[in-house]
Image (cartoon, rainbow, N blue to C red):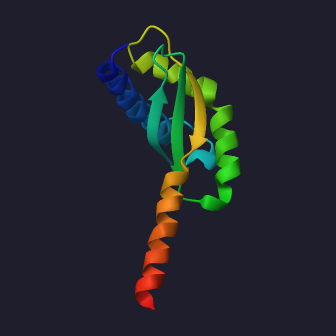
């Protein structure tokens, strides 16, 4: 599959999964989740969904809730995205945002001294 089509699918999945999480899932642990990226394999069999949450303390509960809602999310995606086979979803916590925040804090510490 060409990379442009894959990028378009990944982009559509970020948008649609974000909508599903915001509007259709009632689990309290999924309320403040942001989908940062989706990376799909070339054969569209698997997709890693990178997420982050505002409440760092509930990261474990959030990830468990997302794994539990995987079937519902996949079914909802099937109704919204026109591809023959919706990939298996794997939710991964996006550490890059947290890493960036730590670096920012270090820079502020250095400049504050």
Which residue is the extreme one toward the left?
4
Q: Residue at x 67, y 40 (%)?
A: 65
Q: Position of residue 41 (x, y in %)?
A: 49, 21
- Foreground residue among 24 and 42: 42
Q: Is residue 78 above or below residue 94?
A: above
Q: Is residue 27 above or below residue 6?
A: below
Which residue is the extreme one toward the bottom?
113
Q: Residue at x 52, y 35 (%)?
A: 49
- Foreground residue among 99 and 36: 99
Question: Where the N terminus falls, by quadrant?
Answer: top left
Number of numbered markers: 0
Q: Residue at x 47, y 31 (%)?
A: 39
Q: Position of residue 10 (x, y in %)?
A: 40, 28
Which residue is the extreme one toward the top?
84
Question: Where the C terminus falls, by quadrant?
Answer: bottom left
Q: Position of residue 70 (x, y in %)?
A: 62, 28
Q: Residue at x 40, y 19 (%)?
A: 81
């Amino acid at each position: 599959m060409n990379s442009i089509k894959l990028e378009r699918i990944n982009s559509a999945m970020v948008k649609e999964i974000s909508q599903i999480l915001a509007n259709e899932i009632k689990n309290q642990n999924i309320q403040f989740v942001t989908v940062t990226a989706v990376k799909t394999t070339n054969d569209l069999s698997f997709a890693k969904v990178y997420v982050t949450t505002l409440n760092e303390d509930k990261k474990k509960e959030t990830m468990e809730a997302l794994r539990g809602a995987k079937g519902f999310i996949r079914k909802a995606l099937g109704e919204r995205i026109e591809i023959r086979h919706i990939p298996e979803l794997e939710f991964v916590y996006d550490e890059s945002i947290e890493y960036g925040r730590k670096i920012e804090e270090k820079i502020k510490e250095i400049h504050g001294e």
